Amino acid sequence: AGGLLGWGLLSGAALSSGLLVPLVAPALALVLPGVAAAAARFSGERATRRRLASTLGSYVNPHVLAAVLADPDAVGIQGARRRVTVLMADIVGYSTFSEDRPPEEIVGVLNEYFTEVTEAIQAAGGTVDKFIGDGLLAIFGAPLPLETDGAEQAVAAAMEMSRRLDGLAGRWRARGLPELDIGIGVHTGDAVVGNIGSPRKMEFTVIGDAVNVAARIESTTRSFSRRILLSEGTVERLRQPPPLTDLGEVQVKGRRQPVRLYGLAEED
C-alpha cells in the first residue's frame, strides 16, 4: 500500500512537470505478489483443515468436527489432561461365533454392529476412539468438553446401543445367525486426551487410568450377567440418573482400590 501510494504521488508530480511515468505496470508488480501470498496462505489453511477433517471425520460426530475445524487451537488436541467419560464395549460370545464361520460373514456382522453402535455414540456427542477387534473405545468430553464431563451422554449412548443391539438381534435371527450380546463399561475420570504417538504415526486417542477402569468394568459385566455397568464416578456426575441398582464394591484387576458399580434397574 505504501509503495502504491508513493508511486502514485511520484507519477502525479512527474505529470505536473510534463513527464509521463507508467503507473499500471508498476502497480501490478506491487500488487500481484501480495495477492499470490494471500492465495498461498488461504490454500495452506484449507489443506490443514482437510487434514484435520480427514483425521477426525470418521470418529467424531459432525457437530464436534465443525467446532474443531472452526477453532482447532481451542479444543486441546495436542495432548492434555482432561476429565472425560470412557465407554468400553465388547461383543459377548464373539470367539464362539467366529470359530466356525467364514471371515466374510464375520466382517459383515461386525460392520452391521459397528455401524449401529457408532451412530448411537455420535448422536449422543461421543467420539469413537478406536475399534479393537470386536470391541470399541469411545470418549465423551473430548475433543470438546461436555457438561457432566460426558457422563450423561455416555450413559444415554450405552442405553441406545443396547436398544439397537436388540434390533440387530432380530435381523440376525431371521438370517439364521446366533444372537450376540454386548458388555458395556462406563467410567468417568482423568485421562490424557489428544494427538499421541510419534512424528511418523500420530493418533487422536485417550490414555490413562479412566481407560483402564472402563475396560475392567466392561469385562465384569459377565460376572453380573448384565449388559451395562456404570462406575460410581460416572453415577456421581449424572444430574438425572436412570433407575439404578447398587451392586457394591468390586475389586477390579490392576487396581488397589475397589470400584463401586451400578447396573440399570431395567436389567434386574
Image (cartoon, rainbow, N blue to C red):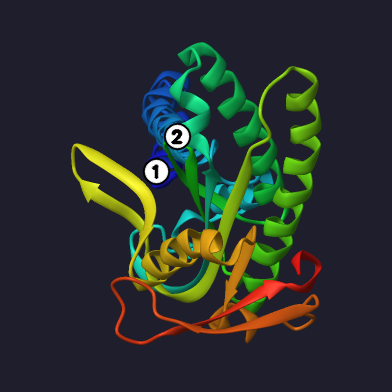
The quadrant holding residue 36 is top left
Which residue occupies 44% across, 60% down?
73
Residue 57 placement (x, y as % from top left): 54, 37
Which residue occupies 54% across, 82% down?
233
- Element type where label 2 sits in the image: helix
The residue identified by callout 2 is 95
User: Is 163 or 58 nearer to us in this picture?
Assistant: 163
Callout 2 amino acid:
Ser
- Element type where label 1 sits in the image: helix
Which residue occupies 64% across, 46% down?
61
The quadrant holding residue 212 is bottom left
Q: Distance between the residues labelled 2 and 1?
A: 79 Å
Of the residues under marks 2 and 1, which one precedes in the sequence? Answer: 1
- Return the mark for residue 6: 1
Q: Using residue 43 as the reference point, say whether residue 157 is left or right of it.
A: right
> Residue 142, can we see it?
no
Task: Answer whether labels 2 and 1 touch (C-beta < 8 Å).
Answer: no
